[in-house]
Structure formats: C-alpha cells, structure tokens
Amino acid sequence: MERLKKSFLLVCALLLLGFFVQAQDGAAGIQQATSMVKGYFDAGCNLMYAIGAILGIVGAIKVFRKWNEGDHDTNKVAAAWFGSCIFLVVVATVIKSFFGV
C-alpha cells in the first residue's frame, strides 16, 4: 500500500512538472548561443595568440639548440616551427571572419 502511494505521488508530481516546463524556441536558442560565442571570442583569440607566442619561443629555442649542435635536420625543424606559427595566426583570422567578429 505504501508503494502505491509513492508511485501515485510520483506520477502526480511528474504531471504537474509537465505543465510548468516549456521548451525554448529553437531560433532564440541559436541566437543566444551565437551571442555567447561572440562574447567569449576575443578572449579566446587572445588566448590562442598567447599559446602561439609561447610555442613560438619554445620552438625558436629548439631550432637554435639544434643549429648550435650542428644537426642535419635543422631546416626541417625550423620549417615545421615556422609553419605552426603561421597556422595559429591563420586559424585565428579565419575563425574571426567566419563568426563576423
């Protein structure tokens, strides 16, 4: 009998909850998500530039060390380092133009 009362109360609670819960409009949700992304976008780009700067410094030190040691693959490492720095800048620029910021 106790189990039946709990089940009945649970069903009543779920029915009442269904009356109070309403779905958000899809277009309004997309607009809200777009405004949130645009709000955080400048901070994200600055973070990407900062990470790129740190990786650039580390890569430059790695290339310099290899150059001083006389390794034969210094050109390959330098090209990879330079390409990754260019990639980070291009990605940030493309994302900015994609979101229209």
Image: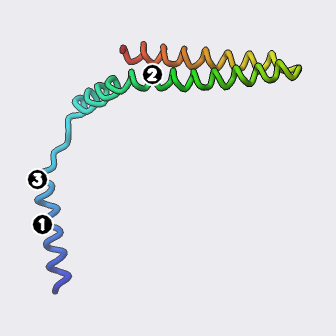
| Camera-nearest residue between 58 and 5 | 58
Q: Residue at x 11, y 59 (%)?
A: 16
Quadrant into which the C terminus falls: top left
* Image coords of residue 41 (percent x, y): 38, 23
Between label 2 and label 3, give the one nearer the viewer. 2
Residue 21 image point, x, y percent: 15, 49
Where is mark 1, residue-wise?
A: 12
Q: Give coordinates of residue 46: x percent, y percent.
A: 45, 22
Q: How busy is the neighbourhood of tag 3: few (under 14 within 10 Å), some, or many (20 plus)? A: few
Which residue position holds label 3? 19
Which circle's residue, 3 or 1, is located before the other in the chain? 1
Between the C-alphas of marks 2 and 3, the distance is 43 Å
- Tell me which residue sits at (12%, 66%) in the image: 12
Residue position for label 2: 45
In the depicted structure, whether residue 28 falls above or below residue 89: below
| Viewer-proximal residue among 15 and 90 | 90
* Amino acid bearing label 3: Phe
Helix, strand or loop under label 3:
helix
